[in-house]
Amino acid sequence: MSGDLVPNVVKELNKIKEESRKCHLLVAGEHEFEVQDQNINYIVNLRTRTCNCRVWDVSGIPCKHAALGIFHRRDSLESFCDSRFSKENYMKAYSYYIHPVPDPTFWPQDLEVEPTNLLPPIVRRMPGRPKKNRRKEPGEAPNVVRRSNMVTCKVCNDLGHNKRTCPVNQDQHQQPPSNSGAAYLPPSFWRGLGVSPQREIISKNNQDAKEVNPYEACKQQ
């Protein structure tokens, strides 16, 4: 039966067959079905050739919901297409001659219409930002872009947090120094004084290393 249809319709039917596999069918009668597609229920009637999605009514080609009911009845999907898509009607539409058009130089000149009067229409910029995406055909599925929201930490390579909220990084900042005799103060205390919380190490004669408290260094300045 597919040999009686034009090639573009046959290609479209192959896409509909693949998309119908994602739907779920509930049989209500011999010619009536309920099809569930992405948590939406559609009513299909093969006797009247209608569906709630209105794709079959507009295009004349069975939609993916109707295709699922047609496959359940073991019928041919091509037999439910509109007759205007057959090769016979296609050849009848183009059976007449298409008369050639002479070159514009041989067209008779109209004295009432001069080239100065034939101006193009004024182009007006429509409100809003111009669209960049291509206009999709009727029944064409939208593009679904899936993005992962999982964050990977650069410190411990664990999932679910970043390096700012990493527990390993926080433990290193909150741990008091072991080799220092000065009392440990949290980093928020040093930021309030306008001093970096990191300790500066000054070496004397490249032999002994001594830790200098930023609070004392701030007093000396």
Image: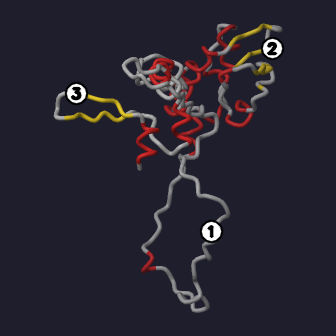
Return the x and y of residue 176 as percentages of the image width and height: 46, 20
Q: Say if mark 2 contacts mark 3, CB within 8 Å.
A: no
Q: Is residue 210 above or below residue 120?
A: above
Q: In which quarter of the image is the N terminus?
A: top right
Task: Give the numbered dot on residue 208.
Answer: 3
Q: In this view, does 5 lie above or below 157?
A: below
Does label 2 or label 3 sit earlier along the sequence?
Answer: 2
Return the x and y of residue 26 as percentages of the image width and height: 76, 8
Q: Could you say which quadrant of the image residue 188 lies in?
A: top right
Query: Tag 3's secondary structure?
Result: strand
Of 192 and 212, the residue lying toward us: 212
Q: Which amino acid does label 1 sit on?
A: Arg
Count residues near mark 1 (Cα–Cα under 10 Å), then give few for <14, some for 14-19, many for 20+.
Answer: few
Which is in the foreground here, disc 2 or disc 1? 1
Q: Is residue 3 above or below residue 213?
A: above
Of 61 and 219, the residue lying toward us: 219
Count residues near mark 2 (Cα–Cα under 10 Å), then give few for <14, some for 14-19, many for 20+.
Answer: many
Residue that label 2 marks: 32
Query: Tag 2's secondary structure?
Result: strand
